[in-house]
Every structure is written in C-alpha cells, then in structure tokens.
C-alpha cells in the first residue's frame, strides 16, 4: 500500500503554452499538490496546504518518484 492517496489530477493544456499536470494528494495527514510538465514530468512546483495557506513543500525523492509513476500511468 502506498503512503499517499491521490485525490485529484488536472491536465491543463492552456498554461503558458505548455501542458501541465497538477496532482492533489493526501500524505501524512496533510494535503499536497505537485505540478509537473506533461511532456517529461519535470516538477514545476510542490505545495502543502495548511491552515488556509499554501506553502512550498519539501517532499522526499521517493514520494515524488512514486507520484510521478502514478501520473504516468494515468495519462
């Protein structure tokens, strides 16, 4: 079983002339978001949502790679 749960995934083909994929997920009782470039799944940004604010998130390489693989399978 994976340590996170993907709640939502949005493919945006109008952002800055490039396609992006934003994935919202729950991990360790927190809500996070990662945006990747769709072409190569390079990370654009990562956020954690706490107390009504969004802050840059520091996620482990393992979690990022695992989510990247899930995104690859879904698109």
Image (cartoon, rainbow, N blue to C red):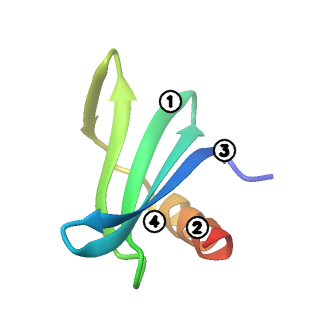
Q: Is mark 4 on a helix, strand or loop?
A: helix
Q: What element carries label 1?
A: strand
Q: How far apart are marks 4 and 3 (CA)?
A: 17 Å
Q: Distance between the residues labelled 2 and 3?
A: 12 Å
Question: Furthest residue to the left?
Answer: 16
- Which one is earlier in the sequence, the residue at label 2 or at label 3? 3
Left/right placement of residue 12 relative to residue 67 reads left
Q: Nearer the viewer, residue 38 or 5?
A: 38
Q: Dots 2 and 3: beta carbons under 8 Å?
A: no
Q: What element carries label 2?
A: helix
Tell me the mark number nearer the camera, choosing from 4 and 3: 3
Left/right placement of residue 4 relative to residue 42 reads right
| Classed neighbour count for the residue bearing mark 1: other residues with Cα under 10 Å, few (<14), some (14–19), many (≥20) | few
Q: In which quarter of the image is residue 55?
A: top left
Residue on which disc 3 sits: 5
Tell me the mark number nearer the camera, choosing from 2 and 1: 2
Residue on which disc 2 sits: 71
Question: Furthest residue to the top?
Answer: 51
Q: Distance between the residues labelled 2 and 4?
A: 15 Å
Q: Determine which of the numbered discs, if any, sits on residue 30 in the image.
A: 1
- Which one is earlier in the sequence, the residue at label 2 or at label 4? 4
């Amino acid at each position: 079983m994976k340590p996170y749960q993907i709640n939502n995934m949005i493919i945006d083909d109008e952002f800055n002339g490039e396609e992006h994929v934003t994935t919202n997920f729950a991990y360790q009782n927190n809500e996070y978001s990662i945006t990747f470039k769709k072409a190569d799944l390079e990370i654009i940004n990562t956020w954690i949502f706490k107390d009504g604010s969004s802050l840059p998130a520091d996620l482990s390489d393992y979690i990022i790679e695992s989510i990247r693989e899930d995104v690859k399978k879904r698109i």
